[in-house]
Image (spheres, helix red, strand yellow):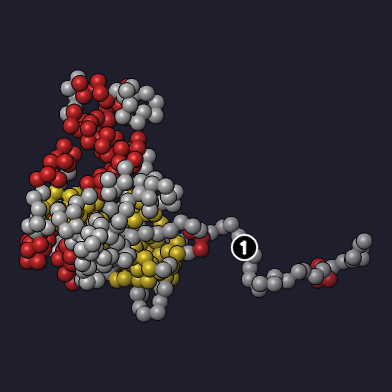
Amino acid sequence: MRRYGKHTDEDDIRSRPNRKGNRPRTNIRPKHEDAAEGMVLTVDRGRLTCLVEDRTVLAMKARELGRKAAVVGDRVALVGDLSGKKDTLARIVRIEERTSVLRRTADDDDPYERVVVANADQLAIVTALADPEPRPRLIDRCLVAAYDGGLEPLLVLTKSDLASPDKLLELYGDLDIPYVVTSREELENGDAADRVRAHLDGKITAFVGHSGVGKTTLVNALVPEERRRVTGHVNAVTGRGRHTTTSALALPLTGTDGWVVDTPGVRSFGLAHIDPSRVIHAFPDLEAGTAGCPRACSHDEPDCALDAWVEEGHADPARLYSLRRLLATRERREGD
């Protein structure tokens, strides 16, 4: 049925009002070309503390980013109130492309991938030589995650006054990983911090390790003006430490242009997200030998071309053993 007459005027036509009282949505989003650049220092319950020039700014993620989350180390673009004053809030409107990503899952059966740190250059794996006992499988898993994510590994062995580092260093000698060995006395008097700092200058370094190994104590020594929470103790029954760091935090390294990222202590390091084919990139002396491998080769099967490559003298057999040990670490639990 015709509602209006033959000669209707536009003013006579009623339009349905917008019940929400706002403008209709559009797919066109602003480009935010004038947005300021910043770096995410820490994340706490949806609020992100960012470094913008020489001041810290509290920000939240813009709705237009959807499910994409920013993590510590991310380079971001911010708009809004960038003064950094109390009770002000900026908006993160863009997350720049990452150069590296350290990721883990809760365990090998967990499909949910957690990004721990973005854009780090180096992963410092902190391990005590005793109290608690070292866990080589956890170190292996951290190495795989570092190689997969594009980070260079660094071994930091603590409490050398309680046990010798020789056996553990021999296990990783063929991987050519730089290392620092420290004692409890050196941690207290600052000598350990000085030797570790020599490996950190000009880099963003994420520190990872299970609780009780002295990771936060070392970070406190490296960045004394940014003391983290008090260190915990090791449980005499379980041999595990108490978590003293509850969120990742990026801290400027004293006296250099480097950064230290202190991460929460871990008791497991799942690798469900890891593509084993990317781990070979950390072994350039072996990578060329994979040209003759069958498709989807696991590099630990009878038809793998790496065996012939090593037999022909192109690489050290110990390097192939190390590669296969790391690739097999997904099949083993950290405590094995």
Q: Is residue 319 above or below residue 5?
A: above
For residue 21, side relative to residue 123 (left or right): right
Do we see residue 226 in this rendering? no
Q: Quadrant of residue 61?
A: bottom left
Q: Which residue is mark 1?
A: 25
Do we see residue 65 in this rendering? yes
Q: Quadrant of residue 249?
A: bottom left
Q: Is residue 297 above or below residue 90?
A: above
Q: Secondary structure at mark 1?
A: loop
The percent coordinates of residue 172 (x first, y second) are 17, 41
Residue at horizontal 25 percent and vertical 20 percent from the top: 308
Residue at horizontal 27 percent and vertical 39 percent from the top: 326
The percent coordinates of residue 305 (x first, y second) are 29, 23
Looking at the image, which residue sits at the far front? 237
Foreground of the two, 108 or 253: 108
The quadrant of the rendering that contains the C terminus is top left
Q: Quadrant of residue 245?
A: bottom left
Foreground of the two, 59 or 217: 217
The quadrant of the rendering that contains the N terminus is bottom right
For residue 319, side relative to residue 92 (left or right): left
For residue 216, side relative to residue 77 (left or right): left
Looking at the image, which residue sits at the far bottom? 86
The percent coordinates of residue 39 (x first, y second) are 33, 62
Q: Which residue type carries mark 1?
A: Arg
Residue at horizontal 63 percent and vertical 68 percent from the top: 23
Q: Is residue 228 above or below residue 103?
A: below
Q: How many marks?
A: 1
